[in-house]
C-alpha cells in the first residue's frame, strides 16, 4: 500500500538521521585539536566532493544491481569473492559496534557538564565507573527493546531529526551573531600546532568520514520509498543538508573562540561554546538535543549491527548460529554478540581511560575497506559495461577511498589489520563447518 511507503521528506529525514548522531556535537573540538582554519576548509572541500561521489556510487549500484540486497556486504562479495565480502561485513560490523560505544560515551560526557564539579567528578569524559554503569544499563535496555522487535517508524525518525536540527540551528544562529572575522583570520593562519598544512588535512579526514558514516542507509531504505527516483534525491539532499550543518558548525566556531581554546574544551564542545555565548540555556539546549539524538541513533545503529552477521551467515561467511531468530523474528544471536562486544568495549574505555576521540578513530578506520570496496565494485562494473559517465563517477569515489586509506596512517591501518585478522579466524571456522 502506498500509505505505508515513505515520501521524499521522510526519506530524506531518514537518510540524514542515519548520518547525524553524536559526532556533530563534538565536532568543533575534534577538529580544532588537529587543524587550523585553512586545513579545515580544505578538508571539507575534499570531503564534500568525495562523499557526494560515494553517495552516487551507492545510488547507481542499487539501481544496476537490485538483486544484491545485502548492501555493502553483497557488493563486495559479488565483485571480489566470498573472503573479501566477509571482510567487508566484518569491518562494517566492527565500525557500527565500536561507533555505538562512542554514542553512549559522549552522551554521559555531556551529562558530566551538568552534574560534575571540580571537586566531584561523576561522569567525566564518559569513562568513569559511574558513566560506565549508566552506559551499561542503557545498552541492555536497548538490547531488550530490539529483542522485542520494536523498530523506528518514519514519523519517529522525522521527530528525532527535528530534535537533532533544532540545537544545531540555535547554535548556528548565536555563533553568526557573535562571529568575529578578525578572530577567524587568526585561526585561519594559526601555526601554533607546528604541523604542516597537508598533515593537518590528513588528520581531519577520518573525523570528516565518521560524521558521514551511515550514508549507505539510503540503499537499505530503497524498498520503502514511494518513488524509486526519490532514493537518489533523498541521498543527495541528506548529504548536502548534513554537509551544510557540519561546515557551519565548525567554521563559525573558529570565529567565536581561538583554535587553542576550542581544542581544550570539554565535549560536547558545541555545548561549551553556546554556554559561553548565552549561559546555562546553551548547555541545556545542546545536551537535551544530544541525548535525544544519541538515543535514536544508537537504536538504529544497533539494528544495523545486528543485521550484518545475520546477512553474512546466510552466505556461510559467519557461523550458522547467527541465523537464529527469536519469536519476534529478530536475529537474536547477532544481537547478543553486538551487545556483549559493546559492553566489553565500555569496560575497556573505563579501564584504559579512553575517550570518544579514540573510539571515533578506531571506528572510522574499520569502515575504510567497506567503502573502498563499494567504489571499486562500482568502477569494475562500469568498466565491464563500458558506461563512461559511471566510470568517471566511480573513479572519483575510488580515488577518495584510496586517499582515506592513505590519510589513516600506518598505525591505524596496522590496527585495522589486526582486527581483520581476528575476523579471518571466524571466516575459516565458518568455512570448516560448511564443508
Image (cartoon, grey):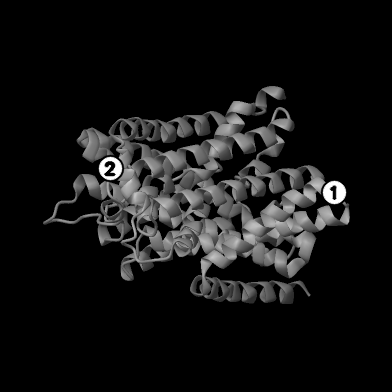
Viewer-proximal residue among 198 and 374: 198
Mark 1 Cα-neighbour bin, 10 Å: few <14, some 14–19, many ≥20: few
Labels 2 and 1: the sequence-earlier one: 2
Residue lying at the far right of the rendered structure: 385
Q: What residue is drawn where x is 43% and y is 33%?
A: 165
Relative placement, left or right, of 403 versus 228 is left
Q: How far apart are the two marked residues, 2 and 1, measured between alpha carbons?
A: 49 Å
**Looking at the image, residue 33 lies above or below residue 235:** below
Dot 1 falls on a residue whose secondary structure is: loop
Q: What residue is drawn where x is 38% and y is 60%?
A: 34
* Observer able to see residue 155: yes
Dot 2 falls on a residue whose secondary structure is: helix
**Looking at the image, residue 357 lies above or below residue 14:** below
Tell me the quadrant of the picture where the N terminus can be found. Answer: top right
Residue 148 image label: none
Q: What residue is drawn where x is 73% and y is 49%?
A: 393
The x and y percentages for residue 110 are 30, 47
Viewer-proximal residue among 44 and 324: 44
Mark 2 Cα-neighbour bin, 10 Å: few <14, some 14–19, many ≥20: many
The x and y percentages for residue 104 are 38, 52
The residue carrying mark 2 is 273
The residue carrying mark 1 is 387
**Looking at the image, residue 191 lies above or below residue 62:** below
Residue lying at the far left of the rendered structure: 119
Viewer-proximal residue among 432 and 354: 354
Amino acid at each position: 500500500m502506498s500509505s505505508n511507503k515513505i515520501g521524499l521528506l521522510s526519506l530524506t529525514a531518514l537518510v540524514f538521521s542515519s548520518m547525524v548522531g553524536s559526532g556533530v556535537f563534538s565536532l568543533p573540538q575534534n577538529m580544532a585539536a588537529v587543524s587550523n582554519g585553512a586545513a579545515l576548509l580544505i578538508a571539507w572541500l575534499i570531503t564534500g566532493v568525495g562523499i557526494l561521489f560515494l553517495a552516487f556510487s551507492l545510488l547507481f549500484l542499487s539501481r544496476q544491481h537490485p538483486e544484491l540486497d545485502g548492501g555493502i556486504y553483497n557488493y563486495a562479495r559479488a565483485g571480489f569473492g566470498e573472503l573479501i565480502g566477509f571482510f567487508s561485513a566484518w569491518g562494517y560490523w566492527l565500525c557500527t559496534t565500536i561507533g555505538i560505544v562512542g554514542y553512549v560515551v559522549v552522551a554521559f560526557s555531556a551529562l558530566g557538564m551538568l552534574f560534575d564539579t571540580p571537586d566531584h567528578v561523576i561522569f567525566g569524559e564518559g569513562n568513569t565507573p559511574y558513566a560506565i554503569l549508566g552506559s551499561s544499563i542503557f545498552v541492555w535496555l536497548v538490547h531488550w527493546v530490539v529483542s522485542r522487535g520494536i523498530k523506528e517508524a518514519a514519523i519517529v525518525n522525522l521527530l528525532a531529526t527535528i530534535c537533532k536540527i533544532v540545537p544545531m540551528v540555535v547554535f548556528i544562529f548565536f555563533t553568526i551573531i557573535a562571529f568575529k572575522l578578525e578572530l577567524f583570520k587568526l585561526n585561519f593562519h594559526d601555526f601554533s600546532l607546528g604541523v604542516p598544512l597537508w598533515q593537518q588535512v590528513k588528520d581531519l579526514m577520518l573525523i570528516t568520514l565518521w560524521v558521514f558514516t551511515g550514508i549507505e542507509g539510503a540503499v537499505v531504505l530503497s524498498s520503502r520509498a514511494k518513488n524509486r527516483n526519490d532514493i537518489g534525491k533523498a541521498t543527495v539532499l541528506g548529504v548536502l543538508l548534513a554537509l551544510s550543518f557540519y561546515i557551519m558548525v565548525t567554521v563559525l566556531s573558529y570565529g567565536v573562540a581561538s583554535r587553542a581554546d576550542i581544542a581544550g574544551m570539554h565535549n560536547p564542545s558545541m555545548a561549551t561554546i553556546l554556554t559561553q555565548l548565552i549561559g546555562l540555556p546553551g548547555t541545556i539546549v545542546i545536551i537535551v538535543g544530544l541525548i535525544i539524538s544519541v538515543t535514536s541513533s544508537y537504536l538504529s545503529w544497533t539494528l544495523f549491527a545486528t543485521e550484518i552477521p545475520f546477512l553474512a551467515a546466510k552466505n556461510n561467511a559467519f557461523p550458522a548460529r547467527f541465523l537464529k531468530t527469536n519469536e519476534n523474528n529478530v536475529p537474536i544471536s547477532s544481537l547478543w554478540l553486538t551487545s556483549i562486544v559493546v559492553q566489553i568495549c565500555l569496560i575497556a574505555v573505563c579501564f584504559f581511560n579512553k575517550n570518544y576521540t579514540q573510539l571515533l578513530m578506531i571506528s572510522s578506520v574499520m569502515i575504510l575497506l567497506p567503502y573502498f570496496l563499494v567504489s571499486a565494485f562500482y568502477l569494475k562494473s562500469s568498466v565491464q559495461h563500458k558506461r563512461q559517465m559511471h566510470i568517471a563517477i566511480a573513479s572519483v569515489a575510488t580515488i577518495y577511498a584510496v586517499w582515506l586509506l592513505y590519510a589513516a596512517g600506518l598505525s591505524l591501518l596496522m590496527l585495522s589489520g589486526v582486527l581483520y585478522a581476528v575476523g579471518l579466524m571466524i571466516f575459516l571456522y565458518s568455512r570448516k563447518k560448511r564443508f
